[in-house]
Image (tube, rainbow, N blue to C red):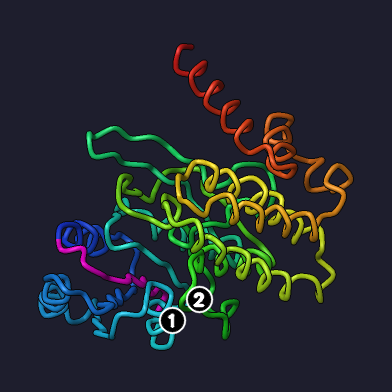
Amino acid sequence: MKLSIIVPVYNVEKYLGACVDSLLAQTVEDYEIILVDDGSTDASGKIADAYADANPARIRVLHIENGGQGRARNFALEIARGRFVGFVDSDDWITPDMYEKLCTKAEETEADVVVCDFLEHYADGTEKVLPAAFQDHPLSSAGSSCNKIFRRDRIGALRFPEGLWYEDFYFSAVMLVRSVKTVFIHEPLYIYRRGQPSTMHNNNAAKNLDMLQIMDMIEQELIPAGRRDDFEFFVVNHVILDSISRLARQDSPDKKEVLQHFRDYAQVKIPRLLACKSFQRESRNRRIIMFLNYHGLAGLSQTILKLNAGMQKKA
């Protein structure tokens, strides 16, 4: 079989139909859909079963106790039969040709990972293209596994961490590190529904500390392989820039303490920021925000970002 599409499902009765319909409309040949009902308490499990009953040759459903998205994906990986594996969140949908384009590119180039851009879709109908990679770096598309396909042989025994936030980032980052060849398709083929609760838009400061556990796991993968520069790339971008900026926007009572944990972590892993090659390769604007975040001035960095956003709107 060419492709396995894995969809963790939890309390998404409002959106699941649109998601599965887009998967059934795929133009790629020889694929399966694995829906994993992660202990839903609404009608999601019944909707999944109805789709499987109507499409028994295409859809399989697993019903498991609630354990989180990573655990649900791991159950599906154990039974996936495709040479390539893709992941879709159950409140999103994809263009009809997404997986045909990704699989064709993988076969033509012998890539281990193929990546496409996102199309952000807002409740008012507004849409915005979100490039998969924020800069010209082979690891810059880590974050989500949903806009990618992965060669099953390269996945091997790798699984999503269970019980931690940012498990998707871990899996995607490690797969990009392991990939001998990663190819990009600069088209927005994955439609990401904005406005839904998500890990990246949260107000739980303490739970964000899971990112530091994830980073330790990535370090264990990279440092023995002599890839410190790649590890520092992740620290610079996903600890100093993204995580600290995300925390700075929160109003949680323990925000200050958690921010200190992130700064301490960054300063231990990269004691001389200005000498860090990954930092030096960043754009001037990104370096300014990183420098301020690293030195405990995240409030100022957020003010600068808001001013820049306001100027761009006026322009």
What residue appears at the point 75 percent right and 42 percent down from the top-left corner? 295
Q: Residues within 10 Å of mark 1 (few under 14, many from 20)?
A: some
Residue type pointed to by label 2: Phe
Q: Amino acid at mark 1?
A: Asn
Q: How many marks?
A: 2
Residue identifier under label 1: 74
Q: Does the segment drawn in magenta span residue 8?
A: yes
Kind of element beneath mark 1:
helix
According to the image, label 2 marks what residue?
160
* Residue in the image at 53% along x and 65% along y: 107
Which residue occupies the foreground of this view, 72 or 204?
Answer: 204
| 143 sits left or right of 26 in the view | right
Image point (56%, 78%), residue name? 155
Q: Which residues are magenta?
A: 1-13
Which of pointers 1 and 2 lies earlier in the amino acid sequence? 1
36 to the left or right of 231: left
Image location (x, y in percent) of residue 309: 51, 24
Q: Is residue 14 left or right of residue 159?
A: left
